[in-house]
Image (tube, coloured by chain):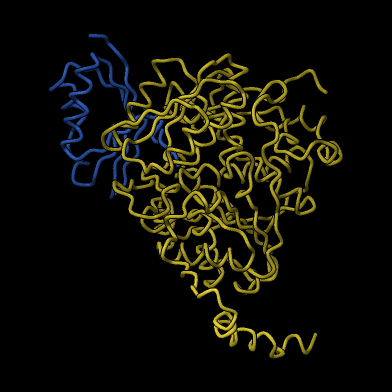
């Protein structure tokens, strides 16, 4: 181990000014976002494929490239989710090599948010915070509540007061303090920002944002390692604020910077729901200024951010890698969820359906060539957004407790199964 | 009332891009404004702005901006996530 710290500073993404590694997130000069900066030369001397492979299977096996000073103390088992070779889905989409990065089974709250929260809370502890907080409509709240509970930190979760009861229960169960706030989102947003400034709490996506956001890189590191230290030629990523997309790009480039892989060509593509698609709309128009969506209207609530904080950077990243953005209707989202479930046995939340549906469009239009490797980032479990597909998966067929009725019901289906299919005859 | 500095993003619709809104804030309210970053296209104007003044005065100015049709966000932009 080198004596030089791997994680060196916070740095403004706009002007490049350096800041100390504190709970700050905005450049004092131009209000640009701060980002973690590293001493890549020092890391190069410490990290290797062998060293990584010898460590426990969690996101922390890439700890040199994550923004904490010591060992992680929160969420030590998070990450290293399966990269599934999705041959049946590949066949349906007409492509050769397709993988699903399956964060529906991320530990402990079944979404990729556990990655960002475990980094934010580990850093919060290093900085001496006793209370952590977030404002969220779903996955982030669940993850903060669960990870804070297991770490013995007091947590506050702020939610819009009209949030569905089912979503609130998934946070309440961990004993967190849930506060519902009345009023439109803009006002809730400003209040959260004021609370974060006034109370000296660790707000994971406000004053701890530079640490929080870096956790997303672990998804990119894992993809490269699980592909045999290769970067996929195409990665399709859902976009809410746009942060995940920029961080997966950062992961791929950092692995090359520290000598884990050689530089390889790759493209990152972004997916949104049409009912809230400010980034995809700007990208398609060829502009970099993202026009806010005042009233998002989509079933994909976890991506429904009308004023995406990292929209500009996501567009730049897609352009730099010759990637593209796409969006899809709510009907296409549901079809995407069902397609992934029926072909690969993976039940994704609506953001996952968005990724699948947009990937399909990118492939059909030739923006992703059929003969190149593709990874789809699936970020949360379908049990969290079941209401989106109620009434859309059919219903069970009900019979009396009689064998005759059962046989009548399945007769045609069994006959079809017994008829040899051309493909089985040839194999 | 306590003095405070508030940092905001203002997002103008195209019809307001030619209006001197920041000058009007200084004239109509007892607030000092300081522009940090600006980006204007045909469709939208984005301004990052620091406002210094009493909390209640700043709240009144924000209400006035919203009434004009300007979207006002904290510099954190999106504190509520999915």
User: Is residue A379 visible to the viewer in this orientation of the structure?
Assistant: yes
User: Which percent across, then down, holds residue A163?
Assistant: 36, 41
> As displayed, is residue B6 above or below residue A245?
above
> As displayed, is residue B53 above or below residue A90?
above
In the rendered image, the quadrant that contains the C terminus of chain A is bottom right
**Residue occupying the point 56% across, 22% down:** A18
The one nearer the camera, A19 or A242, is A242
**Residue occupying the point 52% across, 41% down:** A243
User: Which percent across, then down, holds residue A132?
Assistant: 50, 22
User: Which percent across, then down, holds residue A398?
Assistant: 49, 73
User: Which percent across, then down, holds residue A303?
Assistant: 44, 48
**Residue occupying the point 82% across, 30% down:** A46
> As displayed, is residue A98 above or below residue B71?
below
**Residue occupying the point 70% across, 54% down:** A83
Q: Kindly indicate which chain is depicted in yellow in the rendered structure.
A: A
> As displayed, is residue B19 above or below residue B25?
below
Considering every residue shown, the one lying at the far left of the view is B28
Q: Kindly indicate which chain is depicted in blue in the rendered structure.
A: B
User: Is residue A319 visible to the viewer in this orientation of the structure?
Assistant: no
Classify residue A299 by image quadrant: bottom left
| Total marks in image | 0
In the rendered image, the quadrant that contains the N terminus of chain A is top right
């Amino acid at each position: 181990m080198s004596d030089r710290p791997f994680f060196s500073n916070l740095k403004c993404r706009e002007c490049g000014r350096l800041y100390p590694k504190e709970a700050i997130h905005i450049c004092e000069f131009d209000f640009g976002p701060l980002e973690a900066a590293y001493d890549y030369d020092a890391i190069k001397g410490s990290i290797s494929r062998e060293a990584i492979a010898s460590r426990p299977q969690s996101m922390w096996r890439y700890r040199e490239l994550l923004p904490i000073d010591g060992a992680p103390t929160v969420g030590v088992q998070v990450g290293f989710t399966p990269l599934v070779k999705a041959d049946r889905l590949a066949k349906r989409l007409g492509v050769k090599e397709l993988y699903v990065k399956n964060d529906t089974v991320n530990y402990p709250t079944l979404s990729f948010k556990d990655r960002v929260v475990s980094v934010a809370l580990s850093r919060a502890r290093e900085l001496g915070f006793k209370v952590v907080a977030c404002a969220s409509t779903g996955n982030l709240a669940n993850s903060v509540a669960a990870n804070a509970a297991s770490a013995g930190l007091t947590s506050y979760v702020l939610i819009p007061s009209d949030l569905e009861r089912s979503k609130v229960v998934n946070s309440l169960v961990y004993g967190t303090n849930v506060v519902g706030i009345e009023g439109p989102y803009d006002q809730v947003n400003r209040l959260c920002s004021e609370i974060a400034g006034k109370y000296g709490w660790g707000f994971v996506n406000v004053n701890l944002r530079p640490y929080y956001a870096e956790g997303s890189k672990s998804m990119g590191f894992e993809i490269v390692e699980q592909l045999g230290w290769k970067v996929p030629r195409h990665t399709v990523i859902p976009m809410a604020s746009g942060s995940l997309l920029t961080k997966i790009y950062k992961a791929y480039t950092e692995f090359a910077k520290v000598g884990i892989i050689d530089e390889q060509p790759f493209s990152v593509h972004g997916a949104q729901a049409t009912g809230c698609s400010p980034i995809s709309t700007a990208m398609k128009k060829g502009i970099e200024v993202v026009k806010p969506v005042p009233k998002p209207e989509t079933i994909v609530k976890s991506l429904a951010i009308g004023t995406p904080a990292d929209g500009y950077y996501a567009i730049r990243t897609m352009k730099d890698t010759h990637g593209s953005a796409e969006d899809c209707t709510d009907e296409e989202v549901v079809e995407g969820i069902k397609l992934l479930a029926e072909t690969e046995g993976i039940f994704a939340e609506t953001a996952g359906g968005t990724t699948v549906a947009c990937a399909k469009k990118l492939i059909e239009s030739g923006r992703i060539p059929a003969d190149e490797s593709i990874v789809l980032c699936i970020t949360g479990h379908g049990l969290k957004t079941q209401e989106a597909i109620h009434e859309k998966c059919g219903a069970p067929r009900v019979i009396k407790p009689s064998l005759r009725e059962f046989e009548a019901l399945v007769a045609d289906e069994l006959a079809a199964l017994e008829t040899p299919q051309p493909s089985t005859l040839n194999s | 009332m306590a003095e405070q500095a508030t940092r905001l993003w203002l997002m103008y619709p195209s019809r307001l891009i030619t209006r001197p809104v920041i000058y009007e804030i200084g004239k109509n309210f007892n607030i000092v404004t300081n522009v940090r970053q600006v980006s204007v296209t045909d469709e939208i104007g984005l301004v990052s702005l620091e406002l210094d003044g009493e909390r209640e005065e700043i709240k009144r100015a924000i209400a006035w901006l919203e009434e004009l049709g300007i979207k006002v966000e904290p510099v954190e932009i999106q504190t509520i996530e999915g």
